[in-house]
Image (cartoon, grey):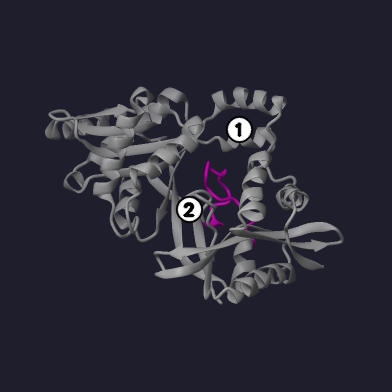
Amino acid sequence: MEVIRLTTKKQLKQFINMADTLYAGDSFYVPYMKNDLLKTLEKLVIKDKTYIALSVVRDGLYIARVLFTISSSKQRKLDRCGFFSHFECVNEQEVADLLLNEMARILKEQGITYVEGTYFPFDQDNRRGIQVAGFEDEPMILTSYNKSYYQTLLEKNGFHKDFDTISYKMEYDNYDLKRIEPTVNKVMKRFDLYISSADFSYLDREIDDVHTVIEKATNDIIFDTAPTREDLVRIVAGWKSFLWPDFIFICRRRKDNQPIGVLMSVPNFYTVFRKMKGKSNIIALLKALYWKKRIRSIRTILQYVVPEYQNHGVNFALYHAFYLACQKRGINYVEAGTIMENNVASCFNVEKAGGKRNKIFRIYGREL
């Protein structure tokens, strides 16, 4: 058994494919789109050399893997910090230690004193953290899913909790439309507001309005700094094929069309990816066309209200509009999050809208 540093395309293919073996028979497992991931890893690991990929090999088989890089950390106030992702491992502490200690050795040689993860390359909200609770519910798009024993492997190796993010299951079985609708109408009338779904024909305007709300509503708990408009353009460009405009809601004042609240959800395309099994050939694409019309679960990923309208029922009105859209589309499973555990206000708003905590995703850190 040995740990190796990956330097070839063939090795990166094995790096990707080992997960299929590890999760064989797991109905919740969601394969990456293999060609896309391979292109990404080739660029990061082989061409740019900004990331390092390691694998543990035993009897010719890849049994553990990790990808890591060095960048700045605003949260820890470090100019250079290690960040890891794509951690997968068989349930053997000796194997995990061999892999993680080699990562630590390489980082220490470069003067790094701290490593944390998991964080996906390019997008720190994508598959963020190691799932440590809520394995009874299906994985939702852009969230992590991993073996339940990963928590033990990491903690026995010296990793500790940095922070948790939380997901909520939204249950509408007892949603009392006759009681709730008058309350929502009262809020909208009192502040002279209206809520509309996004119109991609005016995408620049919609992005501007979403950015305005996020920038005004951002605080130190949510972000160190608000995402720029360019960040939002990049996110929308990358996610556009996974977005349904009728599940992106913007609340505005009637008198001046000023945006004051936003709620954005993403259909759970993981159900489609499972059917595609990581492939992008013609058969897989035909399966995607068939199954994307049958998505019945959705994840709310973003919800903000500007400070002067917070705690006045606007959040509630946005979630009400979301409920009506779910009812129209036949959505029967909703998850909201992930939300930083110390973001008390956001957690309260989701719980008030009917959310119940169901999953925890943990960012782990280790001193080197």
Q: Quadrant of the N terminus?
A: bottom right
| Residue 188 lies in the magenta-colored region | no
| Residue 139 lies in the magenta-colored region | yes
Q: Give me the disc on residue 180.
A: none
In the image, residue 276 lies at what x, y percent? Answer: 67, 33
Sequence-wise first label, 2 or 1: 2
For badge 1, the amino acid type reads Val
In the image, residue 320 lies at what x, y percent? Answer: 31, 33
Does residue 36 appear in this view? yes
Range drawn in magenta: 129-149
| Secondary structure under the numbered disc 1 in the rendered image | helix
* Identity of the residue drawn at 69% across and 46% down: 26
In the image, residue 43 lies at what x, y percent? Answer: 62, 49
Q: Tell me if mark 1 has few (under 14), some (14-19) or many (20+) residues whose alpha carbon lies within 10 angstroms of its own.
A: many
Left or right: residue 310 compared with residue 201 = left
Q: CA distance from mark 2 to mark 1?
A: 23 Å
Tag 2 residue: 124
Left or right: residue 366 compared with residue 347 = right
Q: Is residue 342 above or below residue 169?
A: below
Q: Is residue 290 above or below residue 334?
A: above
Tag 1 residue: 272
Q: Would you say the magenta stretch is mainly helix, strand or loop? A: loop
| Secondary structure under the numbered disc 2 in the rendered image | loop
Does residue 171 appear in this view? no
* Identity of the residue drawn at 65% across and 37% down: 274
Q: In the rendered image, which quarter is residue 45 located in?
A: bottom right
Left or right: residue 305 compared with residue 327 = left
For badge 2, the amino acid type reads Gln
Residue 55 or residue 171, whichever sits in front:
55
- Contact flag, marks 2 and 1 (Cβ < 8 Å): no
User: Mark 2, mark 1: which one is toward the viewer?
Assistant: 2
